[in-house]
């Protein structure tokens, strides 16, 4: 390789920046637990171009989002993954992506790519609390058998919510009251954070432009993906 590793890095940076500026994105929005990543997987199965940022970053993008079995890539490796994903796509066609903050765990999305994503047309996935709780219980089931790790993660929210609230959440985990815990976390932490962030960072976001997820079944995720394709065509 001409220029060695440094030459390769320069190529990745230049081409990633150029690819990002050429792409047009459609952004899947929705509160925590609405299955945005799962819907992206369905869109892939239905033949659409998808940029799975959380998959490339190996992180679900929240305080509880780290993979218990595999660490995140370093920033440079994450950028290489992004570059490799984008160069396999047709920039003349839409790319579906989910709404993300600039950081996904410990890695950050390059500025040029973030700007293009935030300029994308948005569509909101609406789901009831019961559906979101059911899906999160499936997605984060590793915490159900390792409450000590869950409590350790919750302690990271101490400064924000205070020791009394965190102690109550940890008690729910120890008692196996996970449905109550997940619902409390959604109402108290995740939902307010989402609403503040989405309206501030995605100028084309409109909550009324959306589709409904009726349950966390495979059939309903496939139905939502089909509805999103129809809504934005």
Image (cartoon, helix red, strand yellow):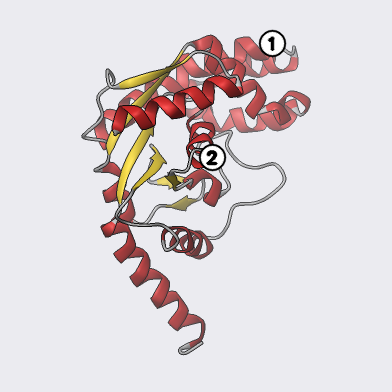
Between discs 1 and 2, the one toward the N terminus: 2
Q: Residue 150, relative to residue 54: is it above or below? A: above
Above or below for 102 versus 176: below
**What is the crowding at mark 2: few (fewer than 14 residues within 10 Å), some, or many (at least 20)?**
few
Q: Position of residue 103 (x, y in %)?
A: 43, 46
Instruction: Classify mark 1: residues with Cα within 10 Å, few (<14), some (14-19) or many (20+).
Output: some
- Snapshot quadrant of residue 28: top left
Q: Which residue is mark 2?
A: 45
Give percent across and percent down for residue 21.
26, 58
Residue depicted at x 63% and y 12%: 179
Tell me the residue at 57%/21% (across/down).
Answer: 219
In this view, which residue lies farthest toward the right? 145
Residue 16 screen position, x and y as percent? 37, 64
- Tell me the residue at 50%/42% (across/down): 44
Front: mark 1 or 2: 2
Q: Residue furthest left?
A: 203
How many numbered marks, from 0 up? 2
Q: State the quadrant of the C terminus.
A: top left
Distance between mark 1 and mark 2 Cα atoms:
35 Å
- Residue 177 is marked as 1
Numbered disc 1: secondary structure: loop
Q: Which numbered circle lies on residue 36?
A: none
Q: Quick check: 114 left or right of 191?
A: left
The answer, for residue 34, to whether it is visible in the render is no
């Amino acid at each position: 390789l001409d220029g060695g590793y440094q030459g390769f890095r320069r190529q990745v940076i230049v081409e990633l920046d150029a690819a990002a500026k050429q792409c047009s994105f459609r952004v899947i929005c929705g509160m925590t637990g609405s299955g945005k990543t799962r819907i992206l997987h369905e869109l892939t199965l239905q033949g659409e171009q998808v940029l799975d940022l959380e998959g490339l970053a190996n992180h679900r993008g929240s305080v509880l989002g780290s993979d218990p079995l595999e660490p995140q890539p370093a920033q440079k490796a994450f950028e290489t993954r992004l570059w490799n994903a984008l160069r396999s796509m047709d920039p003349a066609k839409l790319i579906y992506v989910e709404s993300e903050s600039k950081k996904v765990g410990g890695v950050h999305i390059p500025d040029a790519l973030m700007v293009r994503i935030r300029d994308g047309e948005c569509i909101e996935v609406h789901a009831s609390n019961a559906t979101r709780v059911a899906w999160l219980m499936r997605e984060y089931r590793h915490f159900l058998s390792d409450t000590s790790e869950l409590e350790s993660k919750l302690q990271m929210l101490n400064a924000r919510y205070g020791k009394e609230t965190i102690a109550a959440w940890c008690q729910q985990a120890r008692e196996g009251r996970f449905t109550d815990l997940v619902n409390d976390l959604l109402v108290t932490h995740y939902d307010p954070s989402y609403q503040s962030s989405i309206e501030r960072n995605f100028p084309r976001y409109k909550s009324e432009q959306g589709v409904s997820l009726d349950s966390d079944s495979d059939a309903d995720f496939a139905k939502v993906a089909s509805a999103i394709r129809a809504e934005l065509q």
